[in-house]
Amino acid sequence: MVRIPVEQWCIAVPKREAEGKRQGLIRQGLLDRTLRPKPRGGLLLLPVLEACEGAERCEFEPFPHRPALPRHELIGGIAVLQEEDYEGAERLLASRPSLHTVLLSSGSVEGEFRTRRFQVLAGSPTTRTRVREYGFIFEIDLGLAYFSARLATERQRILEQMEEGETVLDMFAGVGPFAITLARKARIVVAADINPEAVRLLIANIGINRAGNVLPILADAAHLDGIGLRPFDRIVMNLPLAATAFLETAFRLCRSGGHIHLYVLQEREGEILPVLERLPCKKVTERMVRTYSPGRWHAAYDIWVGEQDQAGTNLVP
């Protein structure tokens, strides 16, 4: 039987410490015991059920004595399949006590509210679940608002770059994973979204995580520069299919010397650089976050805002 690799969160530990760490993860209920740990140099990668400090995404092989499972993405207590496999969905549901639902994604993210359609293959007929990520808890509904667990490491990466007391704008906040994560260091985070259901969940997540310095706003990002907001130190633009259309608004809302984090889907390296060359960028770095589909990948552009000097803008692909 062909066993399809499964993508999952994992932590890397030195091999000599692996057994002690494995036992600790079992006691915490975090070890994914359906997947086989794998070596990487002098380290062992241990699959875990949720994002935590030092976690990364890797592919693992299921244990051979256990039923082969279909390829899936885990989001809290929900597994999302890309193929209509009812039998595989039942096996998957039975293999993981933490799961309550297996869904089939019936299409890509669409519309101004960034939603996807789903079909229930097994378990409870719901698209709602809770996600635990780096000590945060997010109430989500995949049918009502966009959420990507795969950006957890990006949220931590930006948090590590921040200084204490920054002002932050999340232009497409969704249910709040970026806004609430960055609130840990920020003085205030303004979290905007055009989707009323996303903002309702955002407000709930602010309460769950006691993030009193996050201000939720139901608003079209295109008009945020017209409501009297002061320039921000840092702006997050996580709208991969359309964020570039809002770049001029973001630059008007970011102070000189501030930072913009732009997430886009692109087909070639540096695809957005010609657009950025027309804007006041001191420096731009580009990195691949993950492969999105054959021929397309999810890229992050970190932009330092400011007027060009005599040497011109430093664009670094």
Image (cartoon, rainbow, N blue to C red):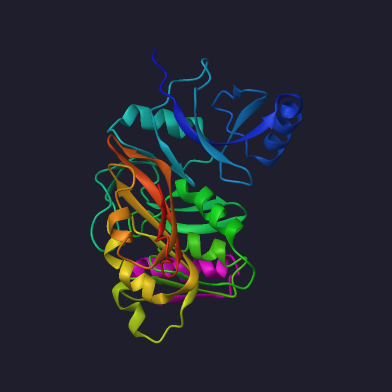
The number of numbered discs placed on residues in the rendered structure image is 0
Does residue 267 appear left or right of residue 227 in this picture?
A: left
151 vs 300, nearest the viewer: 300
**The quarter of the displayed image where residue 88 is located:** top left
Answer whether residue 140 is magenta in the image: no
Indicate whether 175 appears above or below 287.
below
Q: Which residues are magenta?
A: 195-217
- Using the image as rendered, state which of residue 125 and residue 293 is in the foreground: 293
Apparent side of residue 74 relative to residue 227 in the rendered image (left or right): right
Q: Residue furthest bottom?
A: 228
- What residue occupies the far front of the structure in this picture? 310
Task: Please give the name of the residue rendered at 33% of the width and 66% of the height, measured from the top-left corner.
Answer: 279
Residue at 38% across, 71% down: 251
Residue 134 coordinates in the image, percent (x, y): 60, 52
**Above or below, comparing residue 229 to residue 175 in the picture:** below
The residue closer to the viewer here, 105 or 98, is 105
> Split into 4 quadrants, where in the image is the N terminus?
top left
Residue under the point 73% across and 36% down: 24
In the picture, measured across the screen, residue 303 lies left or right of residue 292, that is right
Is residue 210 inside the magenta stretch?
yes
State the image quarter where residue 241 is shown.
bottom left
User: Where residue 58 sits in the image (x, y, percent)?
Assistant: 50, 32
Q: In the rendered view, would you say 75 is above or below 4? A: below
**Residue drawn at (34%, 52%), measured in percent from left and top?**
264
Q: Position of residue 193 (x, y in %)?
A: 36, 69
- Residue farthest to the top, as pictured: 1
Lateral position of residue 150 relative to residue 163, left or right: left
Place of residue 101 in the rendered image (x, y in percent of width and height, measured from the top left): 41, 43
